[in-house]
Image: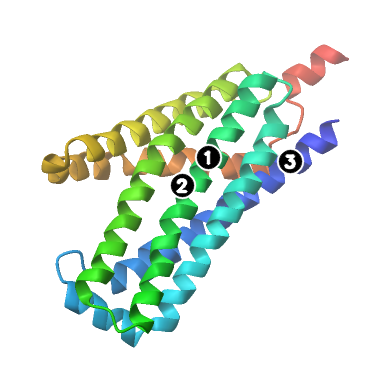
Amino acid sequence: MNLSKRKYAIIAGLSLILMAVLAGYAYGFVYGSLVFPQEGQKTLEAIQKSIGTFKSGIAAWVGILILDILVAWALHLFFKEVQPRLSLATALIRILYSGVLGLAIYHQLAVLSILDGGGTASQVMQELKAFESIWSNGLIIFGLHLIGLGFLGWKAEFVPKFWGVLLIFAGICYSAIHLAKALFPEQIDQIISIEQVLSLPMAFAEIGLAIWLIWKGGRIPSHIKNLSQ
């Protein structure tokens, strides 16, 4: 049984690391270099000139979506013995988030259709804004997943309490920040400033957990091993 837990930990950890790489490419590089929020014509021309890069960004988003579902499954099986219902609910919440992400990705695909049909810059920007809005709303749900994961980590004897606390904190940050973006769009500059301050612990929660899962996840802690002897 321990070998299975170890396997699920490695699957989840490696998937999370790969997701971070894909996200850095899709959002940090592709989206960041081709999309200019206040300049529709410049965005249109940039995407037209680098259409292959834009398509590769969409492919990366699809990869992230698939890995999200894989992570949900692996973490559910990893934490199942701690509290089965909470573990399943936490996994289903992440899958729900994946569905929202899929809807957001559809709007990037719509950009390709607009370009093929000779559409305008305003049409392109409308689809890109829809992508950002839907994805942001999805991250409210993602935050709930992290909170559930944090409670599982806190309850589990085989996970350091630190990760449980950090995941709960990160989940609250995700949900609160993106809920604030949805409810108070006129305060977006202030919200983004707060998000930038909290971005490091938010990112470290999942990346740190991924590294821990690969390194130690599923191994029996020494203090528990000693008790069983």
Q: Which of label 3 and label 2 is nearer to you?
A: 2
Q: Residue sitting at 31 percent across and 63 percent down? A: 127
* Residue closer to the observer: 72 or 199: 72
Q: Mark 1 near mark 2, Cβ–Cβ under 8 Å?
A: yes
Q: Position of residue 113 (x, y in %)?
A: 40, 76
Residue position for label 3: 8
Alpha carbon separation for disc pair 1 and 2? 7 Å
Q: Amino acid at mark 3?
A: Tyr
**Residue at the outermost bottom position:** 49
Q: Residue sitting at 39 percent across and 66 percent down? A: 108
**Residue at the outermost left position:** 186
Residue position for label 1: 96
Quarter of image, res 81: top right
Q: Is residue 205 above or below residue 147?
A: below
Q: Is residue 130 above or below residue 120?
A: above
Identify the secondary structure beneath mark 1. Answer: helix
**Residue at the outermost right position:** 229
Q: Is residue 84 above or below residue 114?
A: above
Q: Position of residue 138 (x, y in %)?
A: 41, 43
Q: Position of residue 5 (x, y in %)?
A: 77, 35
CA neighbours of label 3 inside 10 A, class few (<14), some (14 to 19), many (20+): many
Residue position for label 2: 100
Q: Amino acid at mark 1?
A: Leu
Give the number of the disc on residue 113: none
